[in-house]
Image (cartoon, rainbow, N blue to C red):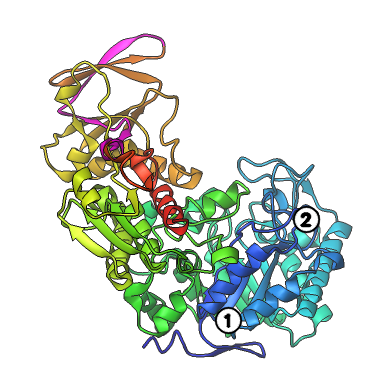
Amino acid sequence: MYEKLFEPIQIGKVKLKNRIVLSPMIVHDVGSQGEVTERMTRYYEERARGGTGLIATGTVLVVPEGRLLARNPSIASDDITYGWTRFVDSIHFHEARACIQLGHGGSQGPSMLKEVVSASAIPRPGRRIPRELTISEIEELIEAFGNAALRSKIVGFDFVEVHGANGYLIQQFYSPLTNRRTDIYGADRNLFAVQILRRIKEKCGEDYPVIFGISGNEFVPGGVTIEDAKVLAARLEENGADAIRVTVGTYETLDRMISPIYLAVSEGFSEFFKAAKEIKKVVSLPVIGGSEVQEPSQAERAIEEGYVDLVLLGRALVTDPEWSKKAREDRVDEIKKCIMCLEGCAAASSQGRNAWCSVNSFHGWEYRFGISPEPAQVKKRVAVVGGGPGGMEAALIAAQRGHDVTLIEEDNELGGTVEKIGAIPPFKKMLHHIAEWYRVQLPKAGVKLELGKRATADYIMELKPDAVILATGSKPLIPDIPGAEKAITADDALLGKVHVGKRIVVVGGGLIGGETALFFAQQEKEVVIVEILSDILRDLDILSMVTLQRLLAESNVRIMVNTAVEQIRKDEVVIRDRFGCKATIPTDTVVLAVGRIPNSELEEQLRGKAKELRAIGDCASPRKIGDAIHEGFAASMFL
């Protein structure tokens, strides 16, 4: 099964047991000076334990001032190598290979730096004007890459990767947009990359394998194109590179680099794969690439059809560290899949916080729990009410710890509001992955499922539970607006319970309002969002927010901020702007999306009766999927 994916491959003189590569991703689990921590080591070790062939770190600094973000691991000096040897050993212990990614942020460095530098004094959009590096400073950086690579070899890394993509310093040299130099580094924009490669080979030996990461396309007018990337790739091969890793996009086209759920590629191959396939036409080296991989069959096809030689898995391995092992053992239905929410990985990293995952509660806690819960010292009878993400997680973790668990759900299917309503828009269909996975895992863990059963306080107490976990969700908030009874909720609109006309006014511009507006706009309806605040989608991470805003604009959704709804009438909405001016909007349907309120009635009825009682997720306070799942995890881990 998946013969190509699990076929060994050689990079330089180092053999990998399979073609699966943990994509370099910054997780921020580092010390204040960039030193390795136990938390960081265990995160990577679990991906190695899970069967991944090549474990690549996120970007590691070659000089302290080369930061990409507020916190980066570092190997910039000899006195910071402590911890890296144990890091590498933990990967080798599981018969995986270790790769360290070396990089410099250039003009994309964080605001905490006194200054940023680049090939030329040309800023990336929204960034500070960098200082142009002098020739002597460039030579010092080339030496710094060489020294960092030598330290990496000494501590035991099997490979180094030079990060020459994603708009960071090396790409700033070979991109026409950011290199306007008039010296040798302007005449030959690829020279900086080549000299770094050659210095590493001189320092570490020609046999020490070097992977070079490049951008196949910036997707910015005047920027790097696939033809530019082909020239660079061929040049790198001529100068001793042992493999090429291909990515696409920059910070200006971040949604190409890190796709949110709205841009998920459900069929075919992403831009990463397409760019990698083009690079394979001009080099004989192994080419590493890929993005948005969920299924082992997709990874297998990418190799079979000549897109790549090795497949990058980023968020897939964040979500399920045992992806590789489960694929090899043909346990594909047990693979937990990424929902591309970006909440804990990309968004957290961009803010300098430790990375986490909405659907993998163990991420970040590997140093304490591994990737499975310890058995409970005292076994309890546990009743979980509600079969949404939080309730399913609570039931699963409790059962895996050895408790006697009953999960009660009034619908005939698991999934809750996320499954019934959240996943209705085609661009949110990846949310179906959540319930699909739990439907496999809960019976295996021994959870007793009572579906189609309404849980009353009396019924729950008849079960004589030692602990009750409530995950009863939330319901739409109906605002105090005259005529609100003439409107419908976003829930009912998405469920098709009522007819939705051609002209729609959506009241509320948060996540629910924005997605509901896009859903109907893509059905060629005329949609207006009315939001009382000064902007919309403020409850999304920045990348998802920008992407959804763009999609709304492309779908001709009219957005009115700083605007209050005064009254809802039969065929119009009366609005008032921040200056007090009133107007009307003709409409066939008004959709309310102004928030949700907890379903807390059962909690009130059980308070004082249940021995242990805990409310999680939306029934405690309406928030997001990750909040519910993590609270379900915590509720059962500490029963």
Q: Residue at the location (58% across, 78% down)?
A: 54
Q: Residue at the location (80% across, 81% down)?
A: 204
Precedes in sequence: disc 1 or disc 2: 2
| Front position among marks 1 and 2 | 2
Instruction: State the extent of the magenta-drawn residues as a range.
Output: 579-604
Q: Name the amino acid type tagged 1.
A: Val
Q: Check disc 1 and report its element: helix, strand or loop.
A: loop
**Which percent across, then down, holds residue 34?**
74, 58
**Is 170 positioned to the left or the right of 518 in the image?**
right
Q: Name the amino acid type tagged 2.
A: Gln
Task: Give the Cα separation between the discs numbered 1 and 2.
Answer: 38 Å
- The circle on residue 33 is 2
> Which residue is the extreme one toward the right?
136
Q: Residues within 10 Å of mark 1 (few under 14, many from 20)?
A: some
- The circle on residue 130 is none
User: Can you identify the residue that label 1 sits on?
Assistant: 283
Where residue 604 sits, quadrant-wise, is: top left
Q: Is residue 263 magenta?
A: no
Q: Check disc 2 and report its element: helix, strand or loop.
A: loop
Residue 451 visible in the picture? yes
Where residue 197 sits, quadrant-wise, is: bottom right
Quadrant where the N terminus is found in the figure: bottom left
Q: Is residue 586 magenta?
A: yes
Do residues under tags 1 and 2 come within 8 Å of each other at their CB atoms? no
**Which percent across, then down, holds residue 50?**
50, 77
